Structure formats: structure tokens, C-alpha cells
Amino acid sequence: MRKLVTSVLAGIGLTLACGTSVYAQEKSLTIFWAEWDPANYLQELGNEYEKETGVKITVETTPWPDFQTKAFTEFNAHGDAYDMVVGDSQWLGAGSTGGHYVDLTDFFNKHKVGDVMAPATVKYYAEYPGGSSKYWAIPLEGDAVGWSYRKDWFEDPKEKEAFKAKYGYDLDVPKDFKALRDIAEFFYRPDQKKYGIAIYTDNSYDAMAMGFENALFSYGGELGDYSTYKVDGFINSDKAVAALDAYKELYKFTPPGWAKSFFVEDNQAITEGLAAMSMNYFAFFPSLINEASNPNAKNTGFFANPPGPNGDQFAALGGQGISIVSYSQKQEEATKFLEWFIKDETQKKWAALGGYTCSAAVLKSPEFQNATPYNKAFYETMFKVKDFWAVPEYAELLQQLNQRVYPYMIGGEGTAKETLDALAADWNATFKKYGRGQ
Amino acid sequence: MATTMITTLDRSSRAAARGLSDISIRNLFIIPTVLFLIVFNIFPLIYSLGYSFTDFRASTNAPANFVGLQNYRDLLNDPYVWSNFAITAKYVIISVAGQLFVGFGVAMLLNRDIPLKGLLTTLLLLPMMLSMAVVGLFWKLLYDPSFGIINYALGLGTFEWLSDPKMALYAVALTDIWMWSPFVMLLSLAGLSAVPKHLYEAAAIDRAGPFYTFFRITLPLVAPILMIAVIFRTMEAFKTFDLAYILTSQPTAELISIRLYKMAFQEWQTGRSCALAYIVLIMVLAITNIYVKYLNKVKER
């Protein structure tokens, strides 16, 4: 109850504060994003913009767990604290239908953004509803789930020999999900405090969904039909059941206490020398090749999410597009910034600073692909990504997924089929509630 | 009765010289507080009651539709919400019982003449002065299976306190007991030192055993103040959020306040979460009322 009262209080406070604030600095723009390295790179890019135009760019951040809550609290209060927001791909539905984002369709067509950026990024970071050719954001930070691994463990001749003897093929970067599982099992040695694999299991936001999607999409499964909202026969198909079992199987080979892990823990698995392989967003890989933050930096390699048993290869999409907040008083100024942002040379600068550009031309350039050990895997991944539902009620769908999948994954309750059947029923009910499809 | 407690204004004081009466000074102090309460507590409370009968979502521009008791009906039919309530009840019982046992026990130990008693008491009070979130983060490290000091000290190897679905709730309750036992101890100490010494002397003359003395003299006399501790702790434990949210994400340790938070601020089901908040409020009120009735009975004796 107190939580609720406090929030209402905060809302009133915000509205008051917004109503009375004075716009002293005409030439400044505030961008809201989560607190992580890419936001610092964006600030640096903003500093370049200030040098060129005199418009000051401030990137305001908040820790990831609060990001969604804080952004939407501000939107719901119709506050203009932020002129632009770099919102998660799932927010598109809520942002567009809720009237929080400015419609950028004209901007998109005028500047041919659809040709500049990689197709998958346009589809998932900008367009809502899917296939409508209506755009609400400019792809800013491309991201997907990839893998890091310990090169020194993989290349050790003794390990190679032992692996070949046990599994009958060479120890190398996993070619498919079966190899991923075998290698995880092979390196799982609790007595030596070495473990096979680190995966996402946290059920508080989208960690569990992202991890499971990696298996689901590569196994050829789907969450549902994005245009008809039909989920029966998709999320509980045989392929999806096999994928969930495969993902649960990996959990056996994780370090102890791996039941609430997301990007921080998964990077720790590599920096602390706990695991042979670790799933994570590409955005978190820069700190793994930095010797200051990873003592094993020299021995860390990267690979794209491997294919499933039928050769399908996909990965779960992360990443964000930048949108103009419709309550901002400086929408024109913000549009100018976006015009500057989509220029080729800006995109090159953005990539050089450490941002994951979505510009197709930059992604394809050898210069980009050879810049870091993971850029090539990133490039490969960005052309085969799929995302979670982007409808306004995505958070309810996520919660239902967490609610069903977590007890099965971690607690071992029920079977994969029962879990996914129940999830399909939950999702059907939710879509029905909001009058979608059927 | 309230007016008799106001001391009358000294005629030579400055306030009197300005012509302020007792009543106007009282009003000066009380009205801002009452206004504050109305604006920031009572008004939102009533406003959210209205929302609880709608399908309002704060994240969209869609108008709120009146849905009657639909939200309440759905919530009370939702097995997940019931399991959250069951988990919360279990948590409250374990945590409050633990605090009572430890807190009262330590108070009994401290209620004698020992050197450095003041310092000892102050040190024991430290846990409850920390922020809940900080305690949560500390204990998450302490419980860590790979490098946590608890497993190391107890020789438990890699026992997974927080990742084990069966253990997680107990681990959270244990942290809460550590944090809030000092509160019970403090109240118990006050109660214990108020027990008249001559009762113990009389008991000693009558050759009463230690158990008899404890159950017939100490406990009955401390009971009212202990009840107050129980009321406070029950209410607080029912509302626990930060500690549990930080420590674990196990569904078996998902307290009702965590469910409420997710519903309100992650899913933005504002109408439904208002309804859930009201259900929780009514439950807390009911439980508190039972306690207060019992407390009054104890006091009468």
C-alpha cells in the first residue's frame, strides 16, 4: 500500500515539477537510457554534436532494473524531462499506442532510414505494429545474445584429447546445440570449481525469455504468429518443447547458485574463471576484452548462437532504437539530432566509440568486422535475430513466461510440454483480454 | 481529554503578547500535518479505491472503463495470487516468531548487571539501523555458494541458500530475523526492567523455581509490550519488499508485495494492482485488529 501511495506521490511531484520548470537552456537535449557503457559512448558522440552545432546533449541514465519503470513513470506523467529515449525493443507497442513516442514515419521515408539500417533492426527497433510501415524509432544500438568462451580451456591439447575420446569429435567452438551441451558437460567439474556454462535464468524482467529464445529460435520454434496472435501450435509445438528441454539441460552445468543470473553474473562467470562458455548480450563484451576488467581477457573468444538440430540458426534480439518523446518541448531540435545521427560518418564514429551501429554499410565493412574479436560474430548475428512480442501488454506476457518457465527450469516442476501448454493458455487469455487476433 | 494535556500559555510570553490563544497555537501545529495527511495519504487512498473498479492502465491513453468487481473477482480466483498470500503468511510466521524468540532471549540475557552493558546493547542494535536494501545486498554476498562466508563458516560446501526453491524463503526470513530481532530486544528490555524487583524477591522467598518465576511473573508482565512488538513486526513483515526482492527471485519466495510491484510498475495494470493493494490493506487491518483486541485483553489482566 505504502508503495502505491509513494508512487502516486511521486507522480504528483513530477507533474508539479514539470509544470513549473523553466526552460533556461534553449539549446540542449536530454536523452534517457540505461546505465551501461554504450550510454557513455553515446555521451561522447553527443559531445561531438555539441562541438559541431552548439547544442548540448546530456545522456541521463538509471540502472537497468529501474530503467523500464522510471521511463514509463515519466511517460505516464506526461513529463518532458527527456526529449529522447533509447527504449527497449519491446516498448514499441506501449510507446506508440500510448502516445508517448512521436511518429517518425515521415522522417523514415524522407531519409530512407529503411535502406540505411540493417533490415532486422528496422523491423524490431522501429516498426509497430509489425508490417504496418509505421515507424517510431531510429535503430541506435544493435544488440543480440551471443556467447563468450575460454579459448585457453578449449585449446588445451590434453582437454582436446580427452574430449575426443569421450564424445568422438573435436573440441572446438560449438557447431550446434548438441555440441554446446556436450562441451558444457565436459567442463562441468565442481570439484575443481570449474563449470560448463553460464546462462540467463533471472525471472524479474526479460533475462529468462532471452535465454530460452536463443534455444527456441535455433530449434526452429516460434513464440507465436506475430500477425494473428495465434500461439497454440507455436509456443507449445514439439520443436518448442525440445528447445525448452535443451535449455533446461544446460542449467545442469551452470555454476552453483545460478538461479538469478543475468548479464552481470554471466560476465562474472568468465572474469572469475568459473565457466567455459557464457551467454551474454554483445553490448557487454567490450569489458571482456579489457584486461582491467577481465584477467582472462587474452583467453576469451566469442561465437554466435549455434544452430539447432535442423540447422536453423537464430538469436534473441536485444538492443534499442531512439525515439522522440511526444511530451518534449524540443521535438524539432531532437529531429535535427536524429538527422545527424543517421549520417554514414556519424555511424562510423559511433561504431569507433564502441557503439553497436545498426548501419548496414558500416556492419558490412571489413574495418568494422576486424575492429574487435566479437564484431564478426555480431555482424553474423544481426542478420538472423528474432524478438519477443512488442505489444503494449508485453510485460504481462513476460511475467507469464517467467511464471511458467522458471519453476520448470529451476525447480524441475512438471514437464516441458505441460509448462508450454500452460503458457500458451495464459497468452491466449491475455491476447483475448486485449482483443487481439482470433 | 486532549485539551487538558495542553499547558496554558504563560501570560508574559511573546506568543501571548501577539495575541495568540492556546487554541490557535494548537491549530498552527496540527493543521499543516492534517493537510499533509489528507493530500498525500487520504486523497490517493480514496482515489486508488476508485481505480480499483476500473481497467485503467497508466501506461496508455485509453480511457479507464468501469468494470465493477471484475478485478477483485479475477484476483481472488488467481491461484498465483493465493500462493503469494500463502508464502507471505508463512514468511510472517517464521520471521516474527524467530524475532520474538531471539529478541526476547537476548533481552533476558542482557537484563542483569554485566560490564559494558550499554555498549553491548548499542552494538546489538546496529542491524536495524541499516537500510533494508543494503542488508539485502550484504546477505546476498554472505549467502553466495561460491565465496559466501556463511557456507565457509558452517562447512556447507556449495549449499545454495537462495537458489534452492525450498530454502529461499527461509533464507530471506533468516535475514529479516537478524535485522529486526534487536527491535524486539529493545522493547523487551524496557518491559523487563519495569518488572518490580520485589516480585522476584517474593518468589525467591517462596522458593519458586526459575521456570515458575518466568512463566508466572516475567512473561505476564512483559506480555503487553511484547504484543506491541509483535504487532509492529507483523505489519512490517507483511509488507516486506526490498529485502526479498533483492535477495532472491524464486517464485517460492515471491511475497505479495513483490507481486503487487510487478503488477503495478512492470505490467502497468494500474486498476488491478489498486484492487490487490486494497485486498492487502484489508488483510493487514484485520490481522492488526485481532492483535489489538488481544492486547487490550492482556492489559486488562
Image (tube, coloured by chain):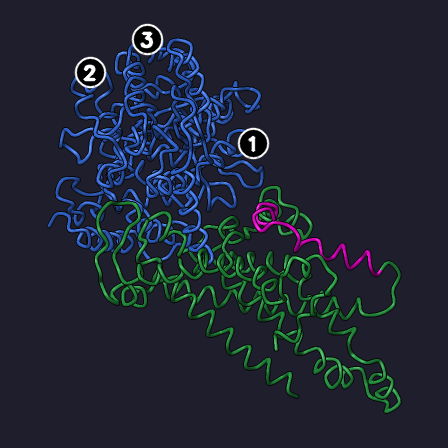
Chain colours: A blue, B green
Residue B163 visible in the current orientation:
yes
Residue at label 3?
A345
Nearer the viewer's eye, disc 1 or disc 2? 2
Residue at label 2?
A111
Mark 1: secondary structure: loop
Q: Which segment did they paint magenta?
A: B117-138
**Three-letter residue code for mark 3:** Glu
Instruction: Please tell me whether residue B120 belongs to the stretch shown in magenta.
Output: yes
Which image quadrant: the N terminus of chain B?
bottom right
In this rendering, would B252 be left or right of A344?
A: right
Do the residues at discs 3 and 1 belong to one chain? yes
Q: Position of residue B255 (x, y in %)?
A: 45, 59
Q: Position of residue B265 (x, y in %)?
A: 38, 48
Determine crowd level at label 1: few under 14, some 14-19, many 20+ residues with C-alpha closer than 10 A.
few
Q: Residue visible at 69% across and 66% down?
A: B9
Task: Name, please, the residue furthest toward the bottom.
Answer: B206
Do the residues at discs 1 and 2 belong to one chain? yes
Which image quadrant: the C terminus of chain B?
bottom right
Residue in front for this viewpoint, A350 or B211: A350
* Badge 3: chain ID: A
Q: Main secondary structure of the magenta part?
A: helix
Question: Who comes first in sequence, dot 3 or dot 2?
Answer: 2
* Badge 1: chain ID: A
Mark 2: secondary structure: helix
Instruction: Please tell me whether residue B19 belongs to the stretch shown in magenta.
Output: no
Vertical placement of A99 versus B292: above or below?
above
Vertical placement of A55 versus B8: above or below?
above
**Three-letter residue code for mark 1:** Glu
Residue at label 1?
A272
